[in-house]
């Protein structure tokens, strides 16, 4: 299987994120990708190639242009304040506040264009974010070109980023950008299967009212888990997209048996939808040893996930999302890919 990877991910390394009243060191760190790359190479999973630059056009097929402008200029606007640390938001247009106008000041923009304070912007963030999207787009092109599957080793991740908002370590929604690129290349029906521990609220929002992209997600119950405000079972799509969103929230402590049963439900729905290509939002933060999550999958279970995804028989693009047990992340990701191939 082809892996697409860029060293530019290292340009994004936030110092901290806001959590329970304190700034804590970022869980989403460059070492994650280095570990995955080492495992992919060690298992002999196939060639690793650099991404091709695709520019803003395919990004703006799923994100608003003003949001992309914000990401591109946020660091410079922040530095103009004289700040030397990372940019982080602290005020949001929630509930009855004015969400119909974009603030002029960067502090206001950071809140307007975000859903939480786990998205530090550093000097190299925009370069890394673009490279991450390019990995997904290059992977999509490979699959469109006839590859059975490809693995976009994206960092930063993407599935919490909506049309006009960053959040949960995500800036551009790499999986959604890739799925849209497949649509634009003529694939009539595309499915996104999100197996990250957290609900892919951004991906869901991007495709919620559409009948051409099916979104299925297995995740920690948002009643007790980030992102808290999306991912419930009664969210099933709207308008033409009614029935094209499937949320499978699972309780804390979920282990392989219940997880794989839910995965079968998700895969059956994707098959029934008639998808012709598949994008997998691949998070391995479902691992029992993950420091921020509460599922109980063991490393061997990831092989079984890969095998079940392969059984769909679809051209498949894996897009890297979360997973924070840095010592095990390479093993777990390689297990999914190996399970798919064998
Ligand atoms: C892509 C992805 O997996 N994003 C996850 C964003 C999760 N944000 C909430 C983090 C909560 C951190 N909890 C720390 C627990 C330490 N014991
Ligand atoms: Zn996650």
Image (cartoon, rainbow, N blue to C red):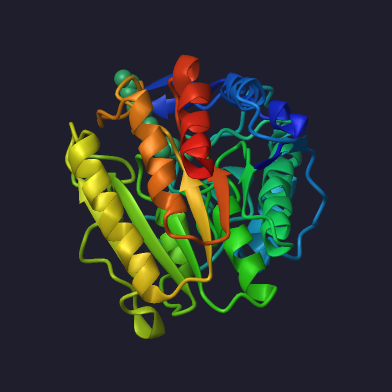
- The answer to whether residue 95 is seen in the rendering is no
**Nearer to me, 122 or 342:** 342
Query: In terms of image quadrants, where is residue 224?
Result: top left
Residue found at the far front of this picture: 342
- On screen, residue 182 above or below 262: below
Snapshot quadrant of residue 238: bottom left
Query: What percent of the width, then of the height, locates residue 104?
Result: 64, 54
Compared to residue 304, the image places residue 16 above or below, namely above
Residue 286, percent from left and from top: 34, 33
Q: Is residue 42 left or right of residue 287?
A: right
The residue at the point 47 percent across, 71 percent down is 275
Residue 159: percent from left, percent from top: 49, 49
Q: Residue at x 68, y 65 (%)?
A: 60
Q: Is residue 69 above or below residue 44?
A: below
Residue nearest the observer in this picture, 84 or 69: 69
Is 3 located above or below residue 39 in the figure?
below
Residue found at the very far bottom of the displayed protein: 240
Residue 84: in sight, yes or no? Answer: yes
Q: Classify residue 278 as left or right of residue 269.
A: right
Q: Which residue: 63% across, 33% down?
A: 45
Q: How many marks?
A: 0
Ligand 1 visible in quadrant: top left
Quadrant where the N terminus sits is top right
Rendered image quadrant of residue 231 = bottom left
Q: Residue 78, image x and y in percent?
A: 68, 36
């Amino acid at each position: 299987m082809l892996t697409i990877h860029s060293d530019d991910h290292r340009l994004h390394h936030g110092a901290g994120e806001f959590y329970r009243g304190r700034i804590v060191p970022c869980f989403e760190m460059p070492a994650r990708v280095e570990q995955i790359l080492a495992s992919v190479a060690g298992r002999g999973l196939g060639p690793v190639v650099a991404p091709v630059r695709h520019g803003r056009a395919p990004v703006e097929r799923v994100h608003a242009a003003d949001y992309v402008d914000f990401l591109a200029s946020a660091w410079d606007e922040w530095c103009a304040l004289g700040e030397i640390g990372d940019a982080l938001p602290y005020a949001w247009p929630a509930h009855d506040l004015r969400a119909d106008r974009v603030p002029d000041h960067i502090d206001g923009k950071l809140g307007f264009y975000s859903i939480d304070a786990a998205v530090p912007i550093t000097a190299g963030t925009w370069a890394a974010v673009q490279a991450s999207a390019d990995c997904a787009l290059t992977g999509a092109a490979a699959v469109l070109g006839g590859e059975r599957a490809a693995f976009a080793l994206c960092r930063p991740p993407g599935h919490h980023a909506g049309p006009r908002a960053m959040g949960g370590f995500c800036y551009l929604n790499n999986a959604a950008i890739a799925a849209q690129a497949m649509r634009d290349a003529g694939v009539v029906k595309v499915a996104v299967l999100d197996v990250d521990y957290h609900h892919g609220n951004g991906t869901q929002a991007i495709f919620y009212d559409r009948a051409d992209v099916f979104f299925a997600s297995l995740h920690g119950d948002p009643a007790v888990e980030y992102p808290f405000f999306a991912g419930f079972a009664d969210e099933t799509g709207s308008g033409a997209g009614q029935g094209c969103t499937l949320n499978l929230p699972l309780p804390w402590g979920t282990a392989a048996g219940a997880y794989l049963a839910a995965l079968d439900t998700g895969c059956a729905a994707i098959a029934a939808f008639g998808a012709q290509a598949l994008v997998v939002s691949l998070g391995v933060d479902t691992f029992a040893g993950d420091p921020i999550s509460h599922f109980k999958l063991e490393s061997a279970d990831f092989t079984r996930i890969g095998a079940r995804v392969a059984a769909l028989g679809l051209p498949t693009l894996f897009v890297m999302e979360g997973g924070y047990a840095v010592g095990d992340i390479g093993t777990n990701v390689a297990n999914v890919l190996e399970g798919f191939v064998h």
